[in-house]
Image: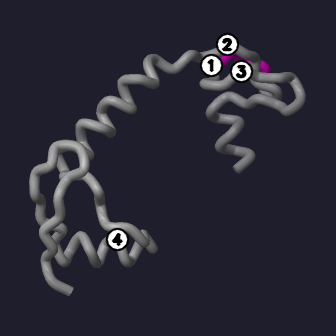
């Protein structure tokens, strides 16, 4: 493998796809080369993270010990919901 020069599809700038990056992509089983330069990849990831906004938490009582806890999903009542301690004990 050799370093490859690619063109970013967002900004049009050239960037180097190094042999180390190519080996990493191959190790992970990625089939495609990166389409964006590292700067545009970071900006895109940052924008995606910001668009998610603040996570909403729901207050529930633990199904095992009864302690009040918060979870990042809306419980449906179909499955038990555990506090962090009880969840780790059941793992």
Check whether the beta carbons of the residues at disc 3 and disc 2 lie within 8 A of each other: no
Q: Secondary structure at mark 3?
A: loop
Residue 60 sits inside the magenta stretch: no
Front-most of residues 19 and 8: 8
Q: CA distance from mark 1 to mark 2?
A: 4 Å
Q: Is residue 87 left or right of residue 66?
A: left
The picture places residue 64, in percent across and down from the top left corner, at 81, 30
Q: Earlier in the sequence, mark 4 or mark 1?
A: 4
Residue with the mark numbered 1: 70
Q: CA distance from mark 3 to mark 2?
A: 9 Å
Position of residue 26 relative to residue 11, above or below, is below
In the rendering, which numbered label is found on residue 74?
3
Residue with the mark numbered 4: 25
Q: CA distance from mark 4 to mark 2?
A: 41 Å
Q: CA distance from mark 3 to mark 1?
A: 10 Å
Q: Earlier in the sequence, mark 4 or mark 3?
A: 4
Q: Where is residue 10, by image quadrant? A: top left
Extent of the magenta region: 66-70
Check whether the beta carbons of the residues at disc 4 and disc 3 lie within 8 A of each other: no
Q: CA distance from mark 4 to mark 3?
A: 36 Å
Q: Secondary structure at mark 2?
A: strand
In the rendering, which numbered label is found on residue 59?
2
What residue do we see at 29% from left, 78% from top?
A: 23
């Amino acid at each position: 493998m050799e370093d490859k020069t690619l063109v970013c599809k967002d900004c049009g700038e050239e960037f180097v796809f190094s042999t180390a990056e190519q080996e990493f992509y191959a190790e992970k089983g990625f089939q495609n080369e990166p389409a964006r330069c590292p700067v545009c990849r970071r900006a895109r990831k940052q924008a995606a993270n910001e668009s998610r906004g603040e996570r909403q938490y729901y207050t529930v009582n633990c199904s095992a010990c009864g302690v009040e806890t918060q979870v990042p999903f809306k419980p449906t009542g179909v499955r038990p919901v555990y506090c962090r301690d009880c969840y780790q004990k059941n793992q």
